[in-house]
């Protein structure tokens, strides 16, 4: 592109010029725009006018600011997705899926879900589900003004929460490594992700402090069974994070407690008693099935009111039949027992596989959640490549990273549905692959190239 093609003397005119060049194909994804000072000098305008033009373009999703790399034309970036890899003949141990045999059969509950028709203008959330949800969150969020909203799953809840509070190019604190759906939501919403490192106790205090200093307007945190690491907030860490947030009561805190009823760990929170903007989101997909697209968001009153504007009967509400089905299941003793058994099963199988690896000299720790986060002594991509040759498809930690860093040394493994023989074979193949990569680094580097 000829940079002389950008014209205008006001922010709106400059932004319109860049958009026209983009629409004509003269500016393409990844193309760099002139630095602000250079553009201002060439057009004979104040530097603040050029800054305002780029801000308008960022808010419209046309450009993205990349720090020292400058401002570039935005595009739709591919993000890895959860679930089975399509058309793979390999044994997929990277799915992140619950065990279908552990998902309660909803057949018996269907009769109780079919009731009178729901008409336009009625409340978005079914009264029975709302009352149950309020009791569910009361012990964790004692705020007497807490409101309950229903959405079509956790991802839908997070997307709506961000949209009602933020503008494009606003900064959001995300865990690093991070849940794939959160990365996808933030990128496609046009927000700027600020990475906050995660250790065994959850978000680090130093990382959150740096994110707040960087001006984040929202924080997305997983209080337990963090995906992919399995980390859970400890009481001490949660308290230290709340202390950091005490001076930032209007930063929107979104807690995605996706593993809630399956978790083997107690719930700890970033949401302090004086925090003014918050949402605790709990979906049912991990224990009632991914196709049961219902999530409950417990929020402060203002956030609830803003969400209400984005949930209109007949278009974006959640089916009351589906809500009643969820409510019927979650008040059924047999279903609750099955969910409890499933949570124990996932924990037991992950711990069993970690023990198999430890017996073979590869230290592993089972945290919480559906997956096992395995640290390797070598680069994960080289190990995953060797596992493919032996019939396994694994996810490397690279897919979950936000910050530019060295190649990941982690694999995220979904092993809870392996048979005993499969678990033995995978453990043997993992240890052997890691050993061979460590012994032949030059050969592995040549393979990757």
Image: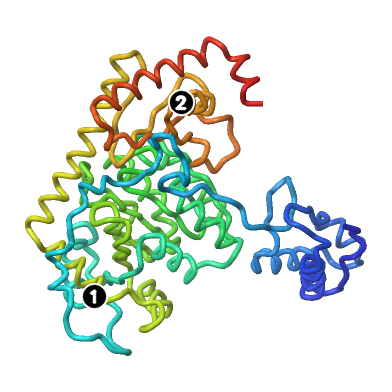
Q: Count neighbours of disc 2 (C-alpha within 10 A) and say few if under 14, some if 14 to 19, many if 20 or more.
A: many
Residue under the image location 40 percent in, 74 percent down: 307
Question: Considering only order in the chain, which callout, 2 or 1, is on the residue closer to the N terminus?
Answer: 1
The relative height of residue 334 versus residue 176 in the rendered view (above or below) is below
Residue under the image location 37 percent in, 47 percent down: 241
Relative placement, left or right, of 62 versus 5 is left
Looking at the picture, tell me which residue is in the foreground, 203 or 256: 256
Looking at the picture, tell me which residue is in the foreground, 175 or 410: 410
**Colour convention of the picture:** rainbow
Asked whether residue 208 appears in the rendered view, the answer is: no
Residue 321's mark? 1
Label 2 element class: helix
Q: Position of residue 416 (x, y in %)?
A: 27, 36
Q: Position of residue 11 (x, y in %)?
A: 78, 72
Name the residue tied to disc 2. Answer: 387
Q: Position of residue 140 (x, y in %)?
A: 22, 57
């Amino acid at each position: 592109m000829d940079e002389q093609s950008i014209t205008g003397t006001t922010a709106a005119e400059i932004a319109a010029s860049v958009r026209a060049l983009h629409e004509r194909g003269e500016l393409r994804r990844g193309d760099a725009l002139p630095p602000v000072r250079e553009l201002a000098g060439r057009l004979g305008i104040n530097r603040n006018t050029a800054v305002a033009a780029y801000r308008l373009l960022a808010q419209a999703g046309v450009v993205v600011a990349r720090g020292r790399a400058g401002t570039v034309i935005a595009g739709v970036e591919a993000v890895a997705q959860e679930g089975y890899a399509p058309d793979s003949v390999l044994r997929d141990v990277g799915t992140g899926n619950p065990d279908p045999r552990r998902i309660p059969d909803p057949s018996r509950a269907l009769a109780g879900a079919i009731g009178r028709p729901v008409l336009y203008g009625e409340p978005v959330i079914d009264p029975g589900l709302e009352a149950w949800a309020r009791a569910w969150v009361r012990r964790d969020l004692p705020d007497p003004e807490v409101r309950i909203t229903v959405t079509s799953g956790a991802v839908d809840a997070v997307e709506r929460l961000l949209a009602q509070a933020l503008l494009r190019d606003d900064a959001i604190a995300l865990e690093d490594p991070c849940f794939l759906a959160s990365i996808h939501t933030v990128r496609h919403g046009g927000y700027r992700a600020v990475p906050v490192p995660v250790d065994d106790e959850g978000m680090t205090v130093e990382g959150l402090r740096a994110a707040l200093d960087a001006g984040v307007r929202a924080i997305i945190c997983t209080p337990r069974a963090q995906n992919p690491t399995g980390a859970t907030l400890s009481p001490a860490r949660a308290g230290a994070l709340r202390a950091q947030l005490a001076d930032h009561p209007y930063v929107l805190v979104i807690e995605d407690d996706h593993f809630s009823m399956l978790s083997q760990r107690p719930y700890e929170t970033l949401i302090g008693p004086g925090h003014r903007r918050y949402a605790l989101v709990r979906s049912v997909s991990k224990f009632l099935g991914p196709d049961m697209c219902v999530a409950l968001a417990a929020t402060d009153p203002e956030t609830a009111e803003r969400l209400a504007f984005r949930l209109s009967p007949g278009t974006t509400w959640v089916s009351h039949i589906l809500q009643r089905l969820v409510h019927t299941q979650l008040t059924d003793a047999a279903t609750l027992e099955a969910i409890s058994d499933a949570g124990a099963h996932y924990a037991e199988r992950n711990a069993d596989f970690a023990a198999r690896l430890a017996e073979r000299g590869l230290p592993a720790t089972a945290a919480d959640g559906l997956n096992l986060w395995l640290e390797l002594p070598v680069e994960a991509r080289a190990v995953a490549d060797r596992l493919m040759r032996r019939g396994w498809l694994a996810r490397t930690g690279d897919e979950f990273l936000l910050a530019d860093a060295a190649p990941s040394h982690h694999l995220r493994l979904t092993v809870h549905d392996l048979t005993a023989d499969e678990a033995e074979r995978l453990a043997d193949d993992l240890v052997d692959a890691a050993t061979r990569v460590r012994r032949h680094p030059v050969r592995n580097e040549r393979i990757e190239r």
